[in-house]
Amino acid sequence: MGKPTGFQEYNRELPSKIKPEERVKNYNEFVGRFSDEKLNQQSARCMNCGIPFCHSGCPLGNVIPEFNDAVYRKSWEEAYEILSTTNNFPEFTGRICPAPCESACVLGINKPPVAIEEIEKHIIEIAYERNLVKPGAPFLKTGKKVAVVGSGPAGLAAAAQLSKAGHNVTVYERDDKPGGLLRYGIPDFKLEKWVIDRRVDVMKQEGIEFVCNTEVGKDLSMDELTRNNDAVVLAGGSTIPRNLPIPGRESKGVYYAMEFLKQQNKRVGNSPISDEDILATGKDVVVIGGGDTGSDCVGTSNRHGARSVRQFEVMMQPPQARTASMPWPSYPMVLKTTSSHEEGVERHWGVNTKEFLGDENGNLRALRVTDVTWETDFLGRPVKFTEVEGSEREIPCQMVFLAMGFVHPQHAGMIEQAGVELDERKNVKAQEGVYRTNVSKVFACGDMRRGQSLVVWAISEGREAARKVDQFLMGHSLLESKDAVNAYEY
Ligand code: FAD
C-alpha cells in the first residue's frame, strides 16, 4: 500500500471534463488527465485491504492494489507490467468500462471507491509515452496456424494471446478497419479511433495479419478457413438488433441505433458511407431504449444539432443508490447519468411505444405512447406491466432510434456454414471456461458466445479462449489464466 492513511486524507476525484456546451461541437474525447499530484493522491486511496474484492469484480482479474501501489511510487514500468499481465488493452477499458471493479472496491462500502478505471488509463497512456509498450516476440514459433474471425475486443485479445504463444495468427474482419464495436459502435467522443490504430500497429509488428473487407461465410468459406488452419476462433459479436414490430415500423425516420452510430463513426473516420445519410440535424429525436447504446444515440444526436432529444425506457426508473437486493460488492443496477445525458436530454421511464405515426408521404411525424406501471415479484423484479388509463398521447418526432439491445449473432453465412450448435438464446454454444464448439477445432468467444455484453468481458473471453486453443494445439499452455486452478485442465 502506497500510503496507509491515503483513504482518510484524500477524497475521490476524477479528471476535469470539457463543458457539455463546448464538447458537443465536435466528436473528440473530452476527459482530461490527472496532474502528477492528483494521480499520486488517487492511487494513495487504495487501502490494500485484506481481501481485494476489486480483483473478482473485474472480469479480467486485474491485480489492482499492486498497480495502485506502483503508481503511488511512480514506478511506471512495474505498474504497466502488472496491468498488462491481465489486460491486453487497458487503453480501451480505461476509457469505456463501466468499472465493476469500482463497485466491488472495499472503500466503496462507506466512501466513494478508488478511481481504478482512471488510474488504469493513466498507467497505459504513460506507458505509451515512455515507449514501454513494445511488440512482444514469442520464445518459439510453433508453426501452427490460427484464424480469428472478428476484430472486436474478443478477437483482438484472442489474437494477441495466440501470437504470444507462438502461433501464426490471421484476423479476418468484414468491415474496412479492425476494432468491431470499438471502431463502429462506440462513438469517438468516448473512444477516439487512433487509440485502436495505435494498438493494431503494435499487433501487426508482432506478426499478426489483419485481413479486412472479408466476410467469412461469404467472401471466404468456413470450409476453406478450417481446412487451411489448425484452429479457428469465432469472435463475430452479437449483431442482430432487437426490433419493435408495431404498426408504422416502416415509416421513414425509424432506424436501428447501430445504423446511425456506425455511419457517424465512419463519417468521423473518413470511411466511405454507402447508405443514405442519417442526420438528426434540426429533428425532434426519440431514442427508444434506456441503456448505453441509447445514451450514445443521445450524445450523437446532440452533436448533429437535433432540435430536441428524448429517451424512452419501458422499465421504471432505477433507484439512485443500492437497495437490499443489490448489496455491495455486486454490480448495482442504479440510475446512471452518462456524459451524454449531461449534454441534454429528456429522460422518461415507464413509457410504452405503441405505434409509429407517419404523414401522407410515409415520413415519421409522431409516436403513440402510454405510461405503464410494473408488477414485481417477491424479489422486486419486474414481471408484468399495465397501461395507465388515460395516459395515451402522441409525441411529435421525425426521427427514432431503436436501442433495445441485440438478440443474437448473425446465423446466415459463417455460423450456418460452420455447423456449430446454438444455445437456447441462439448464441454459439460453447461452455464458458472451455470455449470449444461441437465442431472440431472451432472455438467461440465474446458476444457471439455469451450474448451482448461488455468490452471487458470480450477481452476476458478472448484471452481465456486463446489459452484453450493453445492447449488444444500444444497439449498444454503457458498463457496466463485468470483462474490458475484451471491452468492444466482441458
Ligand atoms: P464485436 O465488437 O461486435 O466485434 C465483432 C466483429 O466481428 C465485428 O467487427 C464484425 O464486423 C466482425 N464479424 C462478424 N461476423 C463476421 C464474419 N462472418 N466475417 C468477418 N468478420 C465478422 N461495452 C462497454 O464495456 N462499454 C461501453 O461503453 C460500451 N458501449 C457500447 C456502445 C454500443 C453502441 C454498443 C453496440 C455496444 C457497446 N458496448 C460497450 C458493448 C461492447 O462494445 C461489446 O460487448 C463488445 O464490443 C463485444 O466484443 P466482440 O469482440 O465479442 O464483438
Image (tube, grey):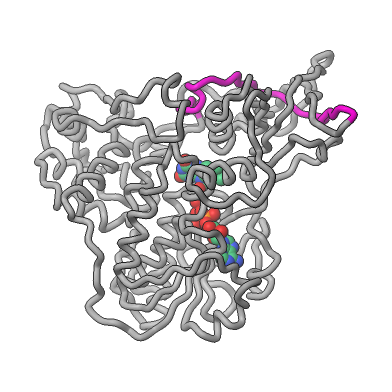
| Residue 5 placement (x, y as % from top left) | 12, 27
Q: Compare residues 189 and 423 and report the one nearer the observer.
A: 189
Evaluate whether residue 40 shows in this view.
yes
Please give the range of residues in magenta.
334-360
Name the residue located 18 percent from the left edge and 54 percent from the top edge: 131
Give the quadrant of the N terminus. Answer: top left
Q: Is residue 345 magenta?
A: yes
Q: Please indicate whether residue 378 sits to the left or right of residue 109 in the image.
A: right
Q: Is residue 243 magenta?
A: no
| Residue 428 placement (x, y as % from top left) | 61, 64
| Residue 321 placement (x, y as % from top left) | 46, 23
| Residue 331 placement (x, y as % from top left) | 45, 37
With respect to residue 289, does 150 lie above or below?
Answer: below
Q: Residue furthest top?
A: 390
Q: Please indicate whether residue 200 sits to the left or right of residue 129 in the image.
A: right
Q: Compare residues 321 and 307 and report the one nearer the observer.
A: 307
Name the residue located 83 percent from the left edge and 16 percent from the top edge: 389
Give the quadrant of the C terminus. Answer: bottom left
Q: Please indicate whether residue 455 sits to the left or right of residue 116 in the image.
A: right
Q: Toward which corner of the image does residue 6 lie, by quadrant?
A: top left
Q: Compare residues 168 and 198 and report the one nearer the observer.
A: 198
Q: Toward which corner of the image does residue 202 lie, by quadrant?
A: bottom left
With respect to residue 182, does 175 lie above or below?
Answer: below
Evaluate whether residue 449 shows in this view.
no
Q: Please indicate whether residue 67 sits to the left or right of residue 162 in the image.
A: left
Name the residue located 74 percent from the left edge and 27 percent from the top edge: 398
State the count of labels: 0
Q: Toward which corner of the image does residue 115 lie, by quadrant?
A: top left
Name the residue located 20 percent from the left edge and 51 percent from the top edge: 80
